[in-house]
């Protein structure tokens, strides 16, 4: 029990620098990038329907936005789950 | 994540280039019997992004096949000259078929890359959901 908690603390300490935001990368820019990808997807879909651009651009843009939405949803679930875990802690 | 989304863009550019190639092939095939038609070819080239290669591919300028047009003997043809010959097209059906098949295979390869990139990115996000 004692060993495992020590390992967990060590592992967390080792993994922490990876998740730290790098120079010039804040949550705001990440959110902006997410919004940009979604907007590109919407624009490609609109163009494909109205002017008939090539389907490759449409498929690529939609796949990119699918990837972005999946990432955002997974991160949100994880963050909300962590908060719930803290709230469930017996005081 | 940027590598995976880059792969998506690269695979899409490959598919786009192969589709453009198939378009030229079908143009050549359609004009196989057009008198005086020269076969159209185009080489692929890399997309330059401010003097650095982005890795994307695109179709280059369309060129005409300079080889000799075949002389076909048909005095009844309206375009035949005094000797009864007219110039046909230099499209070779076998070459066009092979080119079309190659375009199809390359397209499939790019499609597989696209699918695999999507699968990999979904798989790595599945870890977060557990």
Image: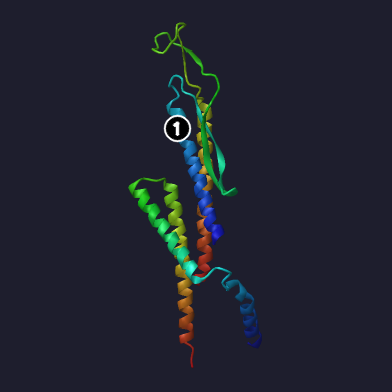
* Viewer-nearest residue: A49 or A35: A35
Query: Which chain letter matches label 1?
Result: B
Can you give x and y, in whole percent of width and height, for residue B109 in the image?
A: 54, 46
Say which quarter of the image contains residue A7: bottom right
Q: Position of residue B2 (x, y in %)?
A: 54, 60
At x 55%, y 39%, the residue is: B44
Is residue B111 visible in the rendered image? The answer is no
Q: Is residue A8 above or below residue A26?
A: below
Q: Closer to the camera, A32 or A15?
A: A32
**Rendered location of residue B80, percent (x, y):** 43, 11
User: What residue is at 48 percent from the left and 32 percent from the top?
Assistant: B25
Residue placed furthest toward the bottom: A91
Instruction: Name which residue lies at 36% across and 45% down.
Output: A52
- The total number of labels drawn is 1
The residue carrying pointer 1 sits among few (fewer than 14), some (14 to 19) or many (20 or more) residues within 10 Å by Cα, namely some
The residue positioned farthest toward the front in the image shown: B50
Residue at numbered disc 1: B26
Report the quarter where the N terminus of chain B lies: bottom right
The secondary structure type at the circle numbered 1 is: helix
Q: Is residue A35 left or right of residue A21?
A: left
Residue drawn at (65%, 84%), measured in percent from left and top?
A: A6
Q: Position of residue B10 (x, y in %)?
A: 53, 50
**Is residue A4 visible in the rendered structure shown here?**
yes
According to the image, what is the colour scheme of the structure? rainbow
């Amino acid at each position: 029990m004692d060993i495992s908690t020590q390992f967990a603390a060590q592992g967390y300490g080792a993994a922490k620098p990876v998740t730290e935001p790098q120079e010039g990368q804040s949550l705001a820019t990440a959110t902006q990038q997410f919004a940009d990808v979604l907007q590109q997807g919407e624009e490609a879909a609109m163009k494909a329907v109205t002017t008939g651009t090539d389907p490759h651009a449409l498929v690529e843009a939609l796949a990119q936005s699918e990837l972005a939405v999946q990432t955002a949803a997974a991160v949100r679930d994880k963050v909300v789950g962590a908060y719930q875990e803290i709230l469930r802690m017996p005081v | 994540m940027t590598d995976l989304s880059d792969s998506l863009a690269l695979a899409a550019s490959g598919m786009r280039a192969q589709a453009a190639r198939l378009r030229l092939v079908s143009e050549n095939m359609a004009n196989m019997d057009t008198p005086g038609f020269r076969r159209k070819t185009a080489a692929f080239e890399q997309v330059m992004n401010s003097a650095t290669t982005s890795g994307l591919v695109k179709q280059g300028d369309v060129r005409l096949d300079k080889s000799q047009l075949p002389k076909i003997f048909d005095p009844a043809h309206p375009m035949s000259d005094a000797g009864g010959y007219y110039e046909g097209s230099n499209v070779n059906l076998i070459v066009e078929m092979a080119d079309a098949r190659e375009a199809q295979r390359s397209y499939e390869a790019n499609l597989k890359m696209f699918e695999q990139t999507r699968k990999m990115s979904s798989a790595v996000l599945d870890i977060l959901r557990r």
